[in-house]
Every structure is written in C-alpha cells, then in structure tokens.
Image: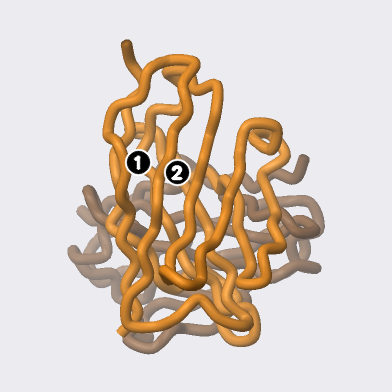
Amino acid sequence: SYELTQPPSVSVSPGQTASITCSGDKLGDKYAYWYQQMPGQSPVLVIYQDRKRPSGIPERFSGSNSGNTATLTISGTQAMDEADYYCQAWDSSTVVFGGGTKLTVL
Amino acid sequence: QVQLQESGPGLVKPSGTLSLTCAVSGGSISSSIWSSWIRQPPGKGLEWIGEIYHSGSTNYNPSLKSRVTISVDKSKNQFSLKLNSVTAADTAVYYCARRVQTTVNAFDIWGQGTMVTVSS
C-alpha cells in the first residue's frame, strides 16, 4: 500500500519560514494536499493540488511537489499557525494521509 | 454555507456494529460530490475510511473494506457509516467530510467530529 511520510515535529521561530515535508514514492506524479488541525478542532484544507490555496487561507501558506517530496511552506510564521499538519494524496481510488507533523512556534 | 453534522452512539460494545450518520445542511448531496468518513484515534493521525458518490458508487480503505458499509439517502440529504465487528482499536473521533470532484477535489468541508468509544 502507498505510504506518505512526514517528520513528527518541526519547530520554527515567530516570523521565520517553516517547511514541512511529505515523502512518498513518485509523489510528484500525484497531487498533494495539506490540512491544518488545531487542538480539538476538525482539519482545515490549506493547500490543494500541490500549490493552490482555498479562499480564506493566508498567502503565507504555499506548497510545492516534485520528485518524491511535497512541501508545505509557511512564510512569516505566526503563533496562530501552531498546529498539526497532514499531507494527503490519492493512490488509485484510495485516500492516503501522512502521519502528521506537529508545528511548534517558539 | 454547507455544513456537515455527525450523529450516533458514543459507546459501542466490542464485536458490535458502529453506526453513524452525517446530515448535510445548506446544500445537497448532488452530482460531483463525494461524501467521506475519516477517523482519528486519540492522539493519532487521520485515517480515511471510505466514500460514496451521490449515485451510490463507493470506495473503501482496503484495510477496513471487509467491515465497512457506507450508504447515502438523498431524500434525507444524509449519508451513513456502518463498521462491524468493532474492537478497542476502532475507538476514535469520526469525521464526515465532503469532496467536490470537479473543483478542489479535496476535503474542503468537515463535520465537527463525533467521539466513539468501543468498550464493554
């Protein structure tokens, strides 16, 4: 079965750039999606089809996908961005989620 | 604004069947919309369970396929999940979510989630 691998945790200082990676076999040949989940809340879509932002998502969120790695980048990270982030892709007609990355802003 | 709301028992006995319903308001289960169930065990990550199209076509997570049934009732604008032969490993927050295939093609709207505990 297809697997997506994320680092368990990433730390960033306020105002700096945070990068969260998601690795999978030939992931660049698929679309990658990213979700943000605050504690006790439902996930929120922040990036779809590799690099597109849904309405209402700040411009500081961006995405890329090439080779075996997709990356979620948060520029000028704010304290409010501290959350768990999950990548997602499709393998045939099956949805696959990465294990999640806890972003700490300190 | 489309909203999703899960409902169902919060406690299920081992070997029993977990049954949940997701009510859709502010919109209809219509063409191009896949309706999904996703779960999250306490302190763990997201796991996709499966989805159903408005026509009734389904896709399931291969690891759960033998125990899962997802159905849709367009007249009531809701869809349902049944998971049988449950064990403690099925304890999780269960979310319903929407995917519009022709646009974002991602889970852009989620329910608030409902906690289901499997215990005797």
A65 relative to A6 in the view: left or right: right
- In front of the other: B57 or B44: B57
A44 relative to B37 in the view: left or right: left
Image quadrant where residue B69 sits? top right
Q: Please state which amino acid type lies under the numbered disc 1.
A: Val
Question: Residue A3: image x %, image y %?
Answer: 69, 44
Q: Which residue is mark 2?
A: B39
Q: Chain of mark 2?
A: B
Q: Which residue is mark 1?
A: B93
A53 relative to A83 in the view: left or right: right
**For the residue carrying disc 1, how many other residues have a C-alpha within 10 Å: few (<14), some (14-19), or many (20+)?**
some
Looking at the image, do the residues carrying marks 2 and 1 touch, with CB atoms under 8 Å apart?
A: yes
- In front of the other: A7 or B49: B49
* Direction top: furthest residue: B120
- Give the colour of chain B: orange
The brown one among the chains is A
Q: Give above or below for B112 relative to B39.
A: below
